[in-house]
């Protein structure tokens, strides 16, 4: 560390047995998956019309990306202000094609420009089938649909996306996470709870029937407690996917906006890690419900990061972000969320977990509380500044000057 404040931080953390340089090194190796759909309000490139399936982006801040070139330019701008090398999370509706292609007919070649983009920047790519905003999802049912023809369409789409994910993994040398989330459910109390879940199980069995090398593809399934228009019953509940994942060698993905407001994902992570090789996360911020607000440096984010680090699971927890705010500068929203996730991980890496665990095991709860409270005022921000300096990105709010100039020069000129 090069200045007095950083040297002081290094000294004070060393008294706790924390090597700040080692913490920075561990943080620099963490790849977070940044969601492409923040850049255009989940619009995609299909021009399919309004969002549906419980998806909603509020606000009309100027400068939304209108095509692949603009979206990639905005991602480039955001990544230039985020420390480290990461991954881009792509939905199926972001296929780049000369002519419209039905979702069940998508192929790796339709995502070749994303691979070119990622390869040139040393990034990884993740993939998601898009089971919303489509005529065949208009009644809110996809993989659990009673109509076999509609269900087959969505099964074929999900199979196609697994092949795309495998292609990403092979081309980039970084495993691609393929995440299945469906909007299926009912607005009012259903007459049959078992039938839709039985159909979903059968659909997933068909989707995952082909085994794909995990060096290239990691399959995940994502639950939700409820959604807009499906308030009474969600087919893909947490209990359903938790059991399905355990029995079928896929990974359960936890979105911290997809549970009851009094539930916290941070408490679920250790239990999941006891029984699963890996756990996947979509980190967001729900305000009263699954509102997908921009991730801020709040208590739950810090607790999520602490549990990942305490469990020595930085290589076992697949971290992705998932939010979309159309009320503020979209590129800035990416930077805010990504840097906050990294800050939370850094705080966790500077946490004397072994010492505090010992206090708990020895029932020294007074000292545990005192230490936990005092640690909140330790100079982690100085270590963060040094990390940013190493990574050649602005350390503080100065990064916003770059975004504001980009808005003036580029975003403001978009119709």
Image (cartoon, helix red, strand yellow):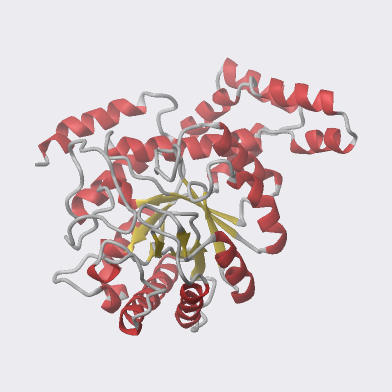
Q: Residue at x 60, y 73 (%)?
A: 249
Q: Residue at x 23, y 75 (%)?
A: 102
* Quarter of the rendering occupied by the C terminus: top left
Q: Residue 375 in the image: state x and y as whole percent.
A: 68, 24
Instruction: Tell me: residue 405, above or below residue 289.
Output: above
| Closer-to-camera residue (224/96) | 224
Res. 13 in view: yes
Q: Residue at x 42, y 34 (%)?
A: 392
Left or right, 202 with respect to 154, comes to right
Left or right, 336 with respect to 193, comes to left
Instruction: Tell me: residue 184, above or below residue 42.
Output: below
Left or right, 361 with respect to 318, comes to right
* Quarter of the rendering occupied by the N terminus: top right
Instruction: Tell me: residue 376, above or below residue 208.
Output: above
Quarter of the image for residue 383 reads top right
Res. 1 in view: no
Left or right, 58 with respect to 181, comes to left
**Looking at the image, how many numbered discs can be counted on the residues?**
0
Instruction: Tell me: residue 246, above or below residue 45.
Output: below
């Amino acid at each position: 560390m090069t200045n007095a404040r950083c040297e002081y931080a290094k000294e004070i953390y060393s008294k706790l047995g924390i090597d700040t340089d080692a913490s920075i090194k561990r943080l620099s190796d963490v790849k977070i998956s940044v969601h492409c759909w923040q850049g255009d309000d989940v619009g995609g490139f299909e021009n399919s019309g309004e969002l549906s399936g419980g998806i909603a982006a509020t606000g009309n801040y100027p400068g939304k990306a209108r095509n692949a070139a603009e979206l990639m330019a905005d991602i480039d701008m955001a990544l230039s202000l985020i420390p480290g090398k990461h991954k881009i999370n792509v939905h199926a509706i972001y296929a780049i094609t000369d002519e419209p292609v039905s979702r069940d007919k998508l192929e790796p070649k339709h995502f070749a420009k994303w691979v070119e983009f990622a390869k040139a920047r040393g990034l990884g790519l993740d993939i998601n089938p898009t089971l919303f905003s489509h005529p065949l999802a208009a009644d809110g049912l996809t993989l659990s649909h009673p109509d076999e023809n509609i269900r087959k369409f969505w099964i074929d789409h999900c199979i196609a996306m697994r092949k795309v994910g495998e292609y990403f993994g092979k081309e980039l040398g970084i495993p691609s996470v393929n995440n299945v989330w469906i909007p299926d459910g009912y607005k009012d109390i259903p007459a049959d709870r078992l039938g839709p879940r039985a159909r979903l199980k059968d659909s997933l069995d068909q989707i995952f029937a082909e085994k794909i090398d995990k060096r290239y593809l990691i399959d995940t399934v994502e639950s939700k407690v409820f959604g807009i228009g499906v308030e009474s019953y969600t087919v893909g509940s947490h209990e359903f996917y938790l059991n399905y994942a355990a029995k079928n060698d896929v990974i359960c993905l936890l979105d911290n906006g997809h549970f009851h407001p009094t539930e916290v994902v941070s408490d679920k992570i250790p239990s999941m890690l006891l029984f699963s090789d890996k756990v996947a996360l979509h980190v967001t911020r729900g305000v009263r419900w699954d509102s997908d607000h921009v991730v801020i440096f709040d208590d739950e984010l810090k607790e999520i990061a602490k549990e990942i680090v305490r469990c020595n699971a930085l290589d076992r927890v697949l971290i992705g972000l998932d939010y979309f705010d159309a009320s503020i500068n979209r590129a800035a929203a990416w930077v805010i969320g990504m840097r906050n996730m990294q800050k939370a991980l850094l705080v966790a890496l500077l946490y004397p977990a072994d010492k505090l665990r010992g206090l708990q095991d020895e029932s020294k709860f007074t000292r545990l509380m005192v230490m936990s409270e005092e640690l909140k005022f330790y100079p982690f921000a100085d270590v963060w500044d040094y990390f940013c300096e190493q990574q050649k990105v602005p350390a503080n709010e100065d990064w916003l000057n770059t975004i504001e100039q980009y808005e003036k020069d580029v975003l403001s000129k978009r119709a």
